[in-house]
Amino acid sequence: MKKHNFSAGPSVLPGTVIDNTAKAIHDLNGIGLSVMEISHRGKDFQSVMDEAVALLREVLDVPADYDVLFLHGGASMNFCMVPFNLLQRKAAYLETGSWAKKAIKEAKNFGQVDIVASSADRNFSYIPKSYEIPADADYFHITTNNTIFGTEILEDIDSPVPLVADMSSDICSRPLDVSKYGIIYGGAQKNLGPAGVAFVIVRRDILGKVERTIPSMLDYRVHIENGSMFNTPPCLPIFAVRETLKWLKEVGGVSKMQEINLGKAGMLYDEIDNSRIFTATAEKNSRSVMNVCFVMKDEYKDLEAEFLSFAQERGMVGIKGHRSVGGFRASIYNALPVGSVQALIDVMKEFEELKSK
Ligand SMILES: *Cc1c(COP(=O)(O)O)cnc(C)c1O
């Protein structure tokens, strides 16, 4: 049976990315060696790294005063690298979910943290809209897409201080004005590739302003100076990221991707909004285009487990909601085909019909 992969992360990748990576595991570019067994400093891997960097720069239109890094440690390592490198006295954070809370917890080890607004009061079902960013903060940190709660900041906000964004789960899902950000970072395993590599887009001039000593591996400047090769980089994940970026470019880039993504999300939210039994958990003006969270209406709550197995039997994978929201979550990242969204909608309709007899 065909599987429709709605996993939250690691998540669906384009078929060509998996095929090309499988080929390179056997033989990279016909050199007779695997991408996993060659020196990262040789020309064959260097060109993989250079192309991955160049492609991310190209698809996101990254200005020249920014560097693009591919590092170990995931988004979570950046939760501490950001304050290590930027927090001298005070940082401002927007608290929009579990990942934001984890970032805040790390920052508190380095200085004062102002939480400018939080949506904890309604279980992170919305993005706070009115708040003031303190002009004396060293930076302002946001989580653009809240993977667990299904809310998203869909525009590039203006900030009087360097804006730092965890974009783990919506990077490359829409065009960005990179010049509005100081740092954009995230784990690759939602929209860009397999687990094992994190991307960082950083404006050089915001670095080097804190007084503390920074361990080399946690110092963005060290990674910039060494072209993401201060130590051995995660070669295989970086190869797969390059393949995903090539695919993205072929599809038509991030503008085209956004159009496709809005179409997919629109279809699914429409189905939920028109349903007698399902209801969305995120408030309408805060809904994520990447992670669609929904539950059964109160009077049908006891059918949730049954729907889950009903959907699983029909090839739907990874739609169980996170325990902090319950119900269901369909992650519909860039690589998820529109046909999979339609397949889920068909299963929802089939179930609803069955239950209304
Ligand atoms: C998945 C995720 C993370 C965690 O990423 P790791 O690479 O596992 O550290 C952080 N932030 C967001 C928004 C995520 O979706």
Image (spheres, rainbow, N blue to C red):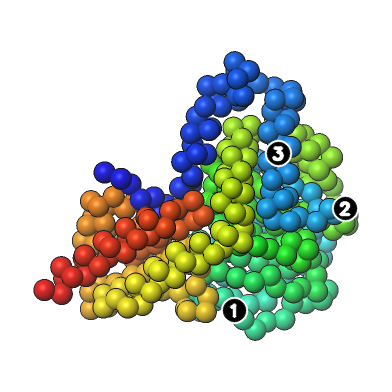
Q: Residue at x 23, y 51 (%)?
A: 313
Q: Which kind of residue does numbered mark 1 sit on?
A: Pro
Q: Which kind of residue does numbered mark 3 sit on?
A: Glu
Tell me if the residue at label 3 has its CB under 8 Å from ligand 1.
Answer: no
Depicted 108 relative to depicted 224: above or below: below
Q: Is residue 215 left or right of residue 33?
A: right
Q: Report helix, strand or loop for mark 3.
A: helix
Q: Which kind of residue does numbered mark 2 sit on?
A: Gly
The residue that disc 3 covers is: 51
Which tag, 1 or 3, sits closer to the chain's start? 3
Quadrant showing the C terminus: bottom left
Which tag, 2 or 3, sits closer to the chain's start? 3
Q: Report helix, strand or loop for mark 2.
A: loop
Quarter of the image for residue 292 reads bottom left
Q: Nearer the viewer, mark 1 or mark 3?
A: 3
The residue that disc 1 covers is: 128
The alpha-carbon separation of the residues under discs 1 and 3 comes to 38 Å
Q: Nearer the viewer, mark 2 or mark 3?
A: 3
Q: Is residue 314 visible?
A: yes
Q: Is residue 6 left or right of residue 84?
A: left
Q: Position of residue 231 (x, y in %)?
A: 73, 32
